[in-house]
Image (cartoon, rainbow, N blue to C red):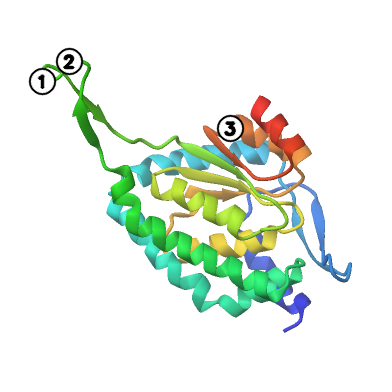
Amino acid sequence: MTEVAVVSSDLLRLRGLLTATGPAMELRSPVTGQVIGELPTSTPADVEVGAQLAHRAQSDWAARPIDERARLLLDFHDHPLDRRDYFVDLLQSVGKDRLSAASEVLHVALTARYYGRTARRYLRSERGEGILPLLTRVDRHYVPKGLVGVIGPWNYPLTMTISDGLAALVAGNAIMLKPDHQTPLVALAAVELLRTAGLPADVWQVVHGRGTVVGRELIDVSDYVCFTGSTATGRTVAAQ
């Protein structure tokens, strides 16, 4: 399968998963420099719209039992493995060698299974003694943050965009993901599989574009931020 075939056959469908109404951006192979397609970019207004949709969907998602949310991750576990060759081809199209690409697919699947199996243990309420033993007690309950913004890197376009969001997802949060502008197709293909596994559409939003255009807006609308990237940009994210 050629790299162009990997992305062009599914480009229109994956485009529909984006919250994006801005100008189109060309996607180029870092290996050959060849244009392999284009996707619309997101505007600051798109980020706001996506955040509103995600916040509304998050309430219903968080209200579901932990076991139901965990079941979705266990169901998702099988999908990337069933389509392993597709994802390996797709990752190769954005510059990964085949062995590294295969390890990313395996990592996402194992992460989904791990949190699917351990979510109840991590999220169960806890009770302990208070400051005055026998007279007081402490009840600890874990509640979702709300909307978790995930900003992913170019060099691990599957594991560092999807795996980091799975724990937040099973904890009852909604996700707004901005993959690196060079590798959006990988993330979109994985989000499509999450929906196939049963995730409500608005719970995981995807925006596309350069960080200088939509990154600040994504951080502004997020209740919690997961960032993987350069130290310099990380300092900017932390300060904001």
- Judged left or right of residue 40, residue 227 is left
Q: Residue at x 15, y 19 (%)?
A: 133
CB contact under 8 Å: marks 2 and 1: yes
Residue 169: tell me if it is visible.
yes
Of badges 2 and 3, the one in the foreground is: 2
At label 2, which amino acid type do we have?
Leu
CB contact under 8 Å: marks 1 and 3: no
- Judged left or right of residue 63, residue 184 is right
Circle 1 sits on which residue?
A: 134
Residue 74 x, y percent position in the rendering: 38, 64
Query: Image height check: is 99 above or below 176?
Result: below
Circle 3 sits on which residue?
A: 221
Q: Residue at x 62, y 29 (%)?
A: 220
Residues 203 and 65: in front is 65
Residue 38 x, y percent position in the rendering: 78, 61
The numbered dot on residue 132 is: 2
Q: Residues within 10 Å of mark 2 (few under 14, many from 20)?
A: few
How far, Cα to Cα, is label 1 from label 3?
43 Å
